[in-house]
Amino acid sequence: MDRSLVIVKPDGVQRGLTGEVISRIERRGYRLVAVKMLQVPRSLAESHYAVHAGKSFYDGLVSYICSSPVVVMVWEGKKVIEAVRQVVGATNPTNAAPGTLRGDYAVEVGRNHVHASDSPENGQAEVALWFRPEELVAWERIGENWLYE
Ligand code: IDP
Ligand code: MG
């Protein structure tokens, strides 16, 4: 089963959007298997965003994710990566469709308030970076029989 790592970034937490992020993914049908709040250490931020090292926005991005606590979670389910990316919307909020989290609640790309894994491989890697295996809870949602064919 694929897993998506989702982060409510510092601006999302400060703006009171944590519940909205969780609610939209939960209502779509996905299963929350881990969640925690933390102040991100710089080393973790640098690892998480290593793919962007060297880009013009990298230093600002690392500072941003470390600037205030985040809520990080793991979601499971069929096609979770693409479905959660769809719920989140395009990276630049002005390109994000209305009805997406970024399209509804963000203005600038550097304050787009939520992260979601972009591939099954990156999902697995990001989950391993942010959580210990024992922090993930194995369970089934009662509605899954009605969700999947
Ligand atoms: P994603 O979050 O939609 O996967 P990525 O391209 O992986 O987008 O970029 C990671 C994060 O880096 C974005 O969510 C955004 O916060 C930030 N970012 C991306 N491009 C820019 C930029 O041009 N200026 C400032 N921040 C950016
Ligand atoms: Mg990305």
Image: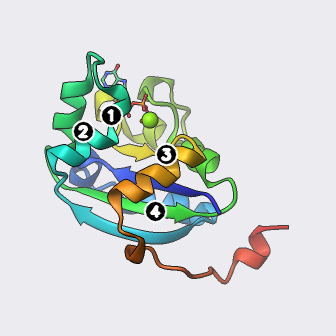
Indicate the amino acid at tag 4.
Answer: Val
Task: Give the CA distance from mark 4 to mark 3.
Answer: 10 Å
Q: Which of pointers 4 and 1 lies earlier in the amino acid sequence?
A: 1
- Please give the label number shown on residue 117: 3
Rendered-image quarter of ligand 1? top left
Pointer 2 with pointer 4, Cβ within 8 A? no
Count of residue discs: 4
Mark sitting earlier along the chain (4/3): 4
Please give left or right for residue 127 compared with residue 58 in the image: right
Residue carrying label 1: 50
Q: Residue at x 32, y 34 (%)?
A: 50
Way the structure is coloured: rainbow
Quadrant holding the N terminus: bottom right
* Mark 4 crowdedness (10 Å alpha carbons): few <14, some 14-19, many ≥20: many
Q: CA distance from mark 4 to mark 1?
A: 20 Å
Mark 2 neighbour class, 10 Å CA radius: few under 14, some 14 to 19, many 20 or more = some
Which numbered tag is attached to residue 46? 2
Nearer to us: label 2 or label 3: 2
Q: Residue at x 19, y 45 (%)?
A: 43
Quadrant of the drawing holding the C terminus: bottom right
- Residue 65 location (% of width, % of height): 23, 42
Q: Picture coordinates of residue 126 (x, y %)?
A: 42, 51
Cα–Cα gap, marks 2 and 3: 16 Å
Q: Residue at x 36, y 35 (%)?
A: 106
Where disc 2 sits, the SS reads: helix
Give the amino acid type for the residue marked by disc 2 in the picture: Glu
Q: Nearer the viewer, mark 4 or mark 1?
A: 1
Mark 3, Cα crowd under 10 Å, few <14 / some 14-19 / many 20+, is many
According to the picture, the residue beneath numbered tag 4 turns out to be 74
First in sequence: mark 3 vs mark 1: 1
